[in-house]
Image (cartoon, coloured by chain):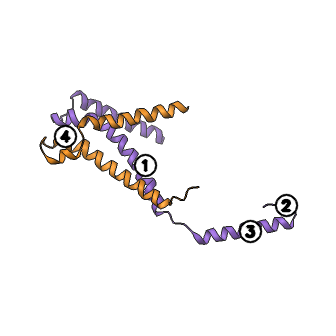
Chain colours: A orange, B purple
Amino acid sequence: MSQVNDKAVGAALLAIGSFVFAYYSIWTLVIPFVDEDHQARQLFPPQWFAVAIPVFLLAVGITGIFGFL
Amino acid sequence: MTKAQQLATAFTAAAVGWLLGLAGVLPLSETVRTQIWPVLPLLLVVSLGSYAFINIGYNLLVFRECPEAYHELMQEIQEAKDDLRTKNVDIA
């Protein structure tokens, strides 16, 4: 049994979940309407990654799950 | 109608609506139709995942430990052990 505090794990999960949700929502719903030369675009990778990263993670995850069945 | 049937109906309706939007039947602006609409299912999956994270994380954070119940339980365990020992059942 590790000594990692339960509350710390909870706080970390909460922070990660909130950040991922906010970042991805802005990335997919807001950025397409922003001009090419607006400085906000520099905070986000190109739109291609907005599709590539989740699809890749899903493929890896589902392969991993079915690999153990 | 069971919960599963309700969920399946809602999911099918959403899927048909999404496919119609892709096919160009719905009145969507060009940016929405090409950039945003195709990504909506992925956004749904990511949202579900982060909702799960947030839910578990929040409940871990606010879970109240009960020291009184813990001590009471340890005492009851001790009493039970002593009681069984008098009846010649040896539990560590």
Residue visible at 23% across and 38% down in the picture:
A46
Q: Are marks 1 and 3 in contact (CB under 8 Å)?
A: no
* Number of residues whose C-alpha sits closer than 10 Å to that of mark 2, classed few (under 14), some (14–19) or many (20 or more): few
Callout 1, which amino acid?
Answer: Ala
Left or right: B75 as drawn, with respect to B31: right
Residue visible at 33% across and 51% down in the picture:
A19
Residue B79 higher or lower than B14, as above or below? below
User: Which residue bears the numbered disc 2?
Assistant: B89
Residue B1 visible? The answer is no
User: Which residue bears the numbered disc 3?
Assistant: B78
Q: Nearer the viewer, mark 1 or mark 2?
A: 2
| Front in this rendered view, residue A65 or B63 | A65
* Number of residues whose C-alpha sits closer than 10 Å to that of mark 1, classed few (under 14), some (14–19) or many (20 or more): some
User: Which residue bears the numbered disc 4?
Assistant: A32
* Chain of the residue displaying label 3: B
Q: Say which element carries label 4.
A: helix
User: Which quarter of the rendered picture does the C terminus of chain A lie within?
Assistant: top right
Distance CA(mark 3)–CA(mark 4): 65 Å
Q: Are marks 3 and 4 in contact (CB under 8 Å)?
A: no
Image coordinates for residue A34, horizontal then vertical, percent: 15, 44
Q: Nearer the viewer, mark 1 or mark 3?
A: 3
Q: Are marks 2 and 4 in contact (CB under 8 Å)?
A: no
Distance CA(mark 2)–CA(mark 4): 73 Å
| Front in this rendered view, residue A44 or B30 | A44
Mark 1 and mark 3 lie on one chain; the one further toward the N terminus is: 1
Q: Are marks 3 and 4 on the same chain?
A: no
Q: Say which element carries label 1.
A: helix
Callout 4, which amino acid?
Answer: Pro
